[in-house]
Image (cartoon, grey):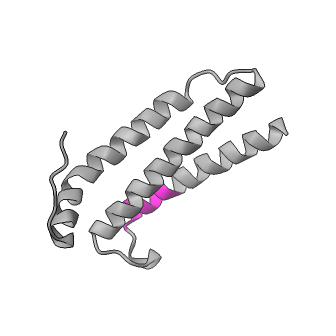
Amino acid sequence: MHFKKAKTLKSLKKNLQKTLPEKVSQVLESYETFSERPIPEDAKGFSAHHSACKSAVTHAETLLKLAKWTEGETSESTTSSGTEDILKLLAEARAELDGAEDETD
């Protein structure tokens, strides 16, 4: 998929509104698939696995922030419950990853 060049912020938002839902879904599906793989037992593999998971969570969070921007949302009180649910799941995933890293220290 090729991204359309936008000449104004309004057209950029319109383009992103069309493409972001699919992109967020792809990132979350990829994260889910990868995170379900067996976690390597060696320190280097373990660290790489968790770093990759954290990267995917950060990527999804960034896309969701962009999605909120395209909808004109500027405060947490205007966030839809669907977006809140996804952000909550991402926060839980991040907390799990942080806890797993603490266990290796």
- Which of these two is toward me, 19 or 93? 19
Drawn side of residue 12 relative to residue 77, left or right: left
x and y, in percent, of residue 3 in the image: 19, 48
Q: Is residue 93 left or right of residue 87?
A: right
Please tell me whether residue 2 is drawn above or below residue 72 in the rendered image.
above
Q: Is residue 4 above or below residue 35?
A: below
The quarter of the picture where residue 71 lies is bottom left
Res. 51 image quadrant: top right
Q: Residue at x 68, y 21 (%)?
A: 40
Residue nearest the viewer, comparing 52 with 83: 52
Residue under the image location 53 percent in, 57 percent down: 88
Tally of numbered tags:
0
Place of residue 73 in the rendered image (x, y in percent of width and height, measured from the top left): 34, 74
**Residue sitting at 52 percent across and 47 percent down?**
57
What range is drawn magenta here?
80-87
Snapshot quadrant of residue 77: bottom left
Q: Position of residue 68 (x, y in %)?
A: 35, 66
Q: Is residue 73 above or below residue 7?
A: below
Secondary structure, magenta segment, majority class: helix
Q: Position of residue 82 (x, y in %)?
A: 38, 59
Quarter in which the N terminus is drawn: top left
In the image, 100: left or right of 35?
right
Q: Is residue 57 magenta?
A: no
Which quarter of the rendering shows the C terminus?
A: top right
